[in-house]
Amino acid sequence: SSRTARSEEDRDSLWDAWGSWSECSRTCGGGASYSLRRCLSSKTCEGRNIRYRTCGNVDCPPEAGDFRAQQCSAHNDVKYQGQFYEWLPVSNDPDNPCSLKCQAKGTTLVVELAPKVLDGTRCYTESLDMCISGLCQIVGCDHQLGSAVKEDNCGVCNGDGSTCRLVRGQYKSQLSASKLDDTVVAIPYGSRHVRLVLKGPDHLYLETKTLQGVKGENSLSSTGSFLMDNSSIDFQKFPDKEILRISGPLTADFTVKIRYAGAADSSVQFIFYQPIIHRWRETDFFPCSASCGGGYQLTSAECFDLRSNRVVADQYCHYYPENIKPKPKLQECNLDPCPASDGYKQIMPYDLYHPLPRWESTPWTACSSSCGGGIQSRSVSCVEEDIQGHISPVEEWKCMYTPKMPVVQPCNIFDCPKWLAQEWSPCTVTCGQGLRYRVVLCIDHRGMHTGGCSPKTKPHIKEECIIPTPCYKPKEKLPVEAKLPWYKQAQELEEGAVVSEEPSFIPEAWSACSVTCGVGSQMRLVKCQVLLSFSQSVADLPIDECEGPKPVSQRACYSGPCSGEATEYNPEETDLLYGSLQEFDELYDWEYEGFTQCSESCGGGVQEAVVTCLNKQTREIADEMLCVTSRRPPQLLKACNLEPCPPR
């Protein structure tokens, strides 16, 4: 045995110490964390270099949804074989429970979208076993890997079944002309392993009532699995019978009813485990019977409602034969001798059958903040209950034998949603200046895509990028024509808008001019579009989804003079035509281009400044009609050839 111990010690000494545990793969619902160690030997080390443990073993809120379903829905924005699908999870695969298999909604198409689900995903819907690194690992009800501990029928981990009772029975329909339906059985909140089988022509249906008093109903019209008040229900409908299963625990009080449908009788067999919601709870010791010189004190038992977490009248606990009231415990107290000056022992009488005053509280108020930490409060008062069960408030000092319950507590201490920017895409060009994009998501404290982030703090989704490789493509000159139709060249200068990941207005090409000569109009379609980054496709949005001014969808056009007409326009045509040119103010403008020759060769003459209409990008002379929206500069004159002329 000593040699064996030494060999194991030598084997472990080849490994470095285990590293710290990684962050949990899930914040709720049960996830996995891992720790690594390094082999210090040049040879192969025996054993594993990674170990796992469970974490995040708190229930997820109902709105979080199924973890496997979340992974399937993440593929909704990705095309499969050229089209989009809404993917639903395929659970309980006996061959490979840890692969992500999903079914396209409304079809029979089942696809393996990933070879491995995320760590912490349940292998099977009715089991705690979880997938870690693509393999199904056994998990006990104590949430430990490799544990074989199971829940009892009451849902208590490693329990003995004493906190619930088995209820079984049979119902037979009694046809009546005045009754269309009847109650089969009422199944209380918290019940588990519910199973009902109806045989006959009649139909089952359900009614529920939550602890808050909210009522619901389900007609059970077809076979399937569905949720009712957050309880998962499995229903099977056959021609001659119906089967209802609810694994539980029920999150509301359920009433199973039968609706008569035929002349023949029906029977319903039912079985479920009902929780014992009223249980005896032993109290602390009562105050000592004497203040000095030796006395005694007793404990008692109070009936406690597990649903409301309140003390109730004893008769509720007497309802269950399994409930046995604990016997009082007795102990001595205040054994110090009394002071000689007193000469007597103060007796503190109390009635063993009269409960002591106790603290009672109102429900907590709503949290002051939905995230980031808030405060909720309640009122706490001292009350007393008489033998008849009537409760009345009393002075607080009467309850001071136990600590007063807190009146405030923190709430919603999880982080508020925040923006998460993913990696930048490659630059859109291979040389020179281009753009690059990234996906920015609003993520909550559970790491799920949500809303609620401030638009003002959203990181930008695109930026300019420069590729150091120079571009050698020659610069193209814009076409400029020296005479009418001048509007054609203005039309060619208009820049096209590019679809981005932000909703933006995208105009289509202008239609042909409505006339073949003179002044007409052109139309175009302006859409609100967005680029879907995952599929790199363009989607149309409602017009009000785009911000900023909408580009015009109609403008004037000029197709040249009609035959036999002079190139003159009436005032209305001029306003219409020139009004469309305001967008080209910055492209064409008047500029001085030197002076004319002197009017005299000697004796003093004048030169006039030459004003031309120039394209400011190409520096080429353009038709003066393109500068009509700019103010023409004033005429400049200067003197020249001032030398006196020679005598003749």
Image (cartoon, rainbow, N blue to C red):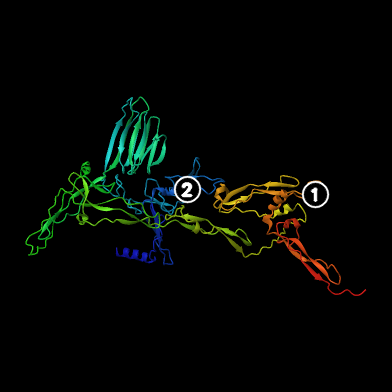
Q: Secondary structure at mark 2?
A: helix
- Above or below, 645 relative to 461: below
Which residue is situated farthest in the right direction here?
648
Q: Is residue 452 left or right of residue 141?
A: right
Could you say where residue 236 lies in the image, as x and y percent from the top left? 39, 35
Residue at (74%, 53%) from the top-left corner?
486
Q: Determine crowd level at label 2: few under 14, some 14-19, many 20+ residues with C-alpha closer than 10 A.
A: many
Could you say where residue 124 lies in the image, as x and y percent from the top left? 40, 46
Q: Which residue is mark 1?
A: 566
Q: Is residue 317 left or right of residue 124?
A: left
**Near-viewer residue (622 or 185):** 622
Q: Which residue is mark 2?
A: 72
Could you say where residue 601 lies in the image, as x and y percent from the top left? 86, 70
Q: Determine crowd level at label 1: few under 14, some 14-19, many 20+ residues with C-alpha closer than 10 A.
A: few
Given the image, on which type of amino acid does mark 2 rest?
Cys
Q: CA distance from mark 1 to mark 2?
A: 70 Å
Badge 1 or badge 2: first in the primary sequence: 2
**Visible in this render: residue 439?**
yes
**Near-viewer residue (613 or 81):** 613
Q: Nearer the viewer, mark 1 or mark 2?
A: 1
Q: Is residue 108 left or right of residue 380?
A: right
**Visible in this render: residue 474?**
no
**Residue 244's image quarter?**
top left
- Above or below, 615 relative to 254: below
Could you say where residue 66 lies in the image, as x and y percent from the top left? 42, 48
